Image: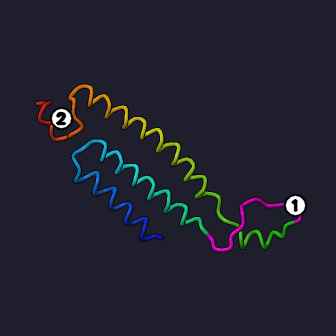
Amino acid sequence: MYILCTVLFVIGIYSIIAKRHIVKKIIGMVIIEYSVNLFLILVGYKAGGIAPILAKGQDVAEFASKGVDPLPQALVLTSIVIGLGTLALMAALAIRLYEKYNTFDMSEINRLRG
């Protein structure tokens, strides 16, 4: 699974560096975000783990040994919200660029800009 995270990250980096289309660059950023979220979830994964909620009458020693760390889950939830905000900002900027230059091609926008 860690290899999948690395492959997704490399695909996102490739999309940002090699592609000229703004929408493809935005998709590359989203793929990078998803790969980081997947990595954080994998870091917090524990085989046979139990939810990080201590129930009444539950053995504390068992909970400590089998409980899953809730910090990566909280980080991923925060990352999803932040990613949604950045995606909305990137989409708004792409729309404004399209309205001004009538193209999504970055090399064409640089040429038209002067």
Q: Nearer the viewer, residue 40 or 26?
A: 26
State the SS at label 1: loop
Magenta stretch, residue numbers: 46-57
Q: Position of residue 90 (x, y in %)?
A: 36, 37
Q: Amino acid at mark 2?
A: Ile
Q: Is residue 53 magenta?
A: yes
Give the overall secondary structure of the magenta segment: loop
Q: Which mark is residue 96?
A: none
Instruction: Tell me the residue that label 2 is attached to.
Output: 109
In three-dimensional space, the C-alpha distance between marks 2 and 1, rounded to whole angstroms, equals 62 Å
Residue type, label 1 = Lys
- Furthest-right residue in this view: 57
> Is residue 103 shown in magenta?
no
Location of residue 75 in the rendering, given as x and y in whole percent from the top left corner? 56, 53
Q: What residue is shown at x 85% (from left), y 67% (from top)?
A: 58
Left or right of 7 in this view: 22: left
Give the residue number, with chain letter if any, for mark 1. Answer: 56
Colour mapping used in the image: rainbow
Packing grade of label 2 (10 A; few <14, some 14-19, many >=20) is some
Q: Is residue 20 above or below residue 68?
A: above
- Quadrant for the C terminus in the image: top left
Residue 11 is drawn in which quadrant?
bottom left
Disc 1 crowd rating (10 Å Cα; few below 14, some 14-19, many 20+) is few
Q: Earlier in the sequence, mark 2 or mark 1?
A: 1
The x and y percentages for residue 93 are 33, 32
Q: Is 113 on the left-hand or right-hand side of 61?
A: left
Residue at x 42% of width, y 71% of height: 3
Residue visible at 33% across and 62% down in the picture: 10
**Residue at the outermost top position:** 100
